[in-house]
Amino acid sequence: MSKLVQSIKEAIALSGLKDGMTVSFHHHLRNGDYVLNMVMEEIANLGIKELNVNASSLFDVHTPLLNHIENHVVTGLATDYIASGLGRAISMGVMEKPVQFRTHGGRPSDIALGRTPIDVAFIAAPTSDPMGNCSGKYGPSACGSLGYAFADAMYAKKVVVITDNLVPYPLQDWSISEDYVDYVVTVDAIGNPKGIVSGTTQITRDPVGLVMASHAAKVIEASGLLKDGFSFQTGAGGASLAAAKFLKEIMLEKGIQGSFGLGGITGYMVDMLKAGCFRSLMDVQCFDLKAVESIRSDARHQEISAMHYASPSSKSAVVDSLDVVILGATEIDTDFNVNVHTDSNGYIMGGSGGHSDTAAGAKLSMIIAPMFRARLPIVTDHVHCVSTPGQDIDVLVTQGGIAVNPRNAKLKEKLVGAGLPVLDIHELKEKTERITGKPQRLPKGDRVVAQVISRYGDLLDNIYNVPQKA
Amino acid sequence: MSKLVQSIKEAIALSGLKDGMTVSFHHHLRNGDYVLNMVMEEIANLGIKELNVNASSLFDVHTPLLNHIENHVVTGLATDYIASGLGRAISMGVMEKPVQFRTHGGRPSDIALGRTPIDVAFIAAPTSDPMGNCSGKYGPSACGSLGYAFADAMYAKKVVVITDNLVPYPLQDWSISEDYVDYVVTVDAIGNPKGIVSGTTQITRDPVGLVMASHAAKVIEASGLLKDGFSFQTGAGGASLAAAKFLKEIMLEKGIQGSFGLGGITGYMVDMLKAGCFRSLMDVQCFDLKAVESIRSDARHQEISAMHYASPSSKSAVVDSLDVVILGATEIDTDFNVNVHTDSNGYIMGGSGGHSDTAAGAKLSMIIAPMFRARLPIVTDHVHCVSTPGQDIDVLVTQGGIAVNPRNAKLKEKLVGAGLPVLDIHELKEKTERITGKPQRLPKGDRVVAQVISRYGDLLDNIYNVPQKA
């Protein structure tokens, strides 16, 4: 018995893929991924049409998808994030059917519940054995965690592992086990290591970013959550990392040992683990090489599946035990609804990822953002698109003040008590508009180009096309 | 959010357990298990009746089940193995409905396929955190692998983790993750460490056993399978271990590095790993303390789920890549059908466990057994009960000769070529009967007390009651 097949083409043929079916991909190779394009090209060559592509995220490296969309090879798209290049085309109306946006927890939940069945999952695996025991930790294209690929492997009817590092059976320390895998294909390279993981993101030196970060750390300290057992997730942005740096200093000074760091893991979180700020890291995705090295070599740094990370239909997920998450926003409205899907011109350039999941789960969910970007205020009356509902956001931290969601009156009390510059969000909006002026409301097109589906599976908002100038 | 509940009673109540439902248990605590009895006592106290119990194996420590059977608390039993004390009662007809015997691979397969749905799984966990991330490797009742509990956790409607070693969230190096767990209960002790794992089983010193073991090693050597990449499973019996010892010597002498050792793992397999005979161990169950220590501390020694081990409905299982398995038998017939369910008087005293699964998967499946026990020949015309079909058995090794299944003519050629004492199985039977005399055929009762269900889910044989003398 062998699962090794000669080519991606052969694997597609054996999988029984037919017109109208759904194929899936994970995004751990990020902007270095070769696999989605290689597979879709073979599918196109085979003349298979009208497929749904369910990808945990799409990056600009996946721009060839646009050809497949134009040629009706791909007519449906479900994903949790779309980078700006591809997103712009979607916003211009390249697809007939709206894109379905989900969250990193909602995607595996809907897969597990059978709402979004997958016919054939293609799993880019930095290392695999001939029976499909595979891992992201080892090999020339190592990406660390394969967290987002577990649901695809477990629930797809057919599973194809594609690797550029075939090792003898059995691979030790597998992530996805052979009992889920139908076929294994070797290729020269599954990705470009330079694009797979970024180098270390620099902590911001921008004075505005540093003020925001300092506020953020003080909010966490004042919240009462910063004590032994503290758990934390933050993004890879410069200001978020600066907040983590200030937090680390407070934790070391006070001798606080947190329980876990969560999420997409950066080298900075690895530093916090090594400094004793956390007992462990729970890693659904590695953001940089330091994180990849750590998950490979440090037993305290553990891989989690997306179900374990954030699925609302799991019996519980790690986000449910999370104390504090620091999140970004392109806009936030006076009801604390957050937009992370579209940019200031209304073009798609992102997605929820784990935004809504962590916001829903964390005891304190904080948006950190500058008061304005390019003279556009962060606070608006109504966000162009609701990515995360305001009920799940506790506080907005800017350089010009901190706005607490009225739903969390106790937090406001604590922050005021700690002498932090707390403002009503309407005040913060007005304060900002005194600097920037009142922006014009963005025009919306008349056609839905994407649906934002909440982590629980219901429609949260629609994203409309961006009307093009004549 | 907390999953911690005050007592087993509370967990049962919260689980919604009702008359006629199915509860499940795993057997990693073996004859030291307290959990099945504690849970069943609470269920009985709550007045719940007519339950099905699906347990991966049952030991004599579980004899209190007989009371629950008599009181109609338990009316259905599904398991892969029943020890002799309980087995005797079953054979005497204590249950109205026949027991369903499955294999260690067939059990998770039938659970995953929905053929044997579980309402509430009770998972004895030597260590757990409050959200149910749990492990068998750590704690005062450590048992090592939790391989047989994965299917229960993944597919039961409700999952209750019962532990005597609660640790802060999150447990590192969990085996079963919180996303499958509904409730967590702490108790004083989940088992008696003395019964959980045996001490080291001694390699046989019995001259008959040593001859068998030496034959066995020579058969493996002559088969052509003993080369780099060799994989191997053996049981914990004295002669099996002696065979492993001879094999180890050959491997070290010839500088052969095997790929993996599989199965229920003993300290002897750990020694082989350390000596370099294998690159890794794939462990569905630890048989002794040395194995428990090894799976905890040696990354080459990996836990596998029962699906990964042996399920015929997995995309593949490790048994499918196995070269050689050494298995036992209470009887084998001239068609090579093997009985491991009943003893020489027809009483239930075992079960397939992984017998049929490894026999079906391995390239060479060998039965090792003495020509006779207490003057009863090992070879018969028809086994009292077919546990593993003869088509999956390649060779029978006894001290008085080696019988090869005619289906494997090439193997016979090789063994004859190697000068091994090969006999036709009918000759071996006659040779034995010249010593022992021809035994009387066992009387069968008229009532089916157990069904032997093959790993694929179909009925393989029936076990009848043992007629009692007046």
Image (spheres, coloured by chain):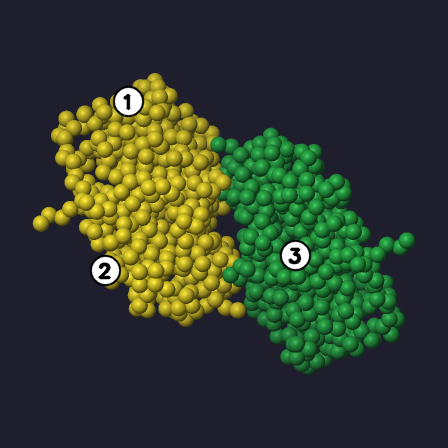
Chain colours: A green, B yellow
For label 2, count other residues whose C-alpha is less than 10 Å away and answer few (under 14), some (14-19) or many (20+). few
Foreground of the two, B250 or B266: B266
- The circle on residue A252 is none
Amino acid found under the numbered disc labelled 1: Val
Amino acid found under the numbered disc labelled 2: Glu
Chain ID for label 2? B
| Element marked by disc 1 | strand
Amino acid found under the numbered disc labelled 3: Arg
Q: Which residue is mark 1?
A: B422
The location of residue B465, given as percent across then percent down, is: 20, 47
Q: Which residue is mark 2?
A: B70
Q: Which residue is mark 3?
A: A102
Chain ID for label 1? B
Q: CA distance from mark 2 to mark 3?
A: 53 Å
Q: At 24% from the left edge and 48% from the top edge, which residue is drawn?
A: B449
Q: CA distance from mark 1 to mark 2?
A: 50 Å
Quarter residue B273 falls in: top left
Contact check, label 2 and label 3, Cβ < 8 Å: no
Q: At 19% from the left edge and 50% from the top edge, which residue is drawn?
A: B92
Foreground of the two, A243 or B362: B362
Foreground of the two, A212 or B118: B118
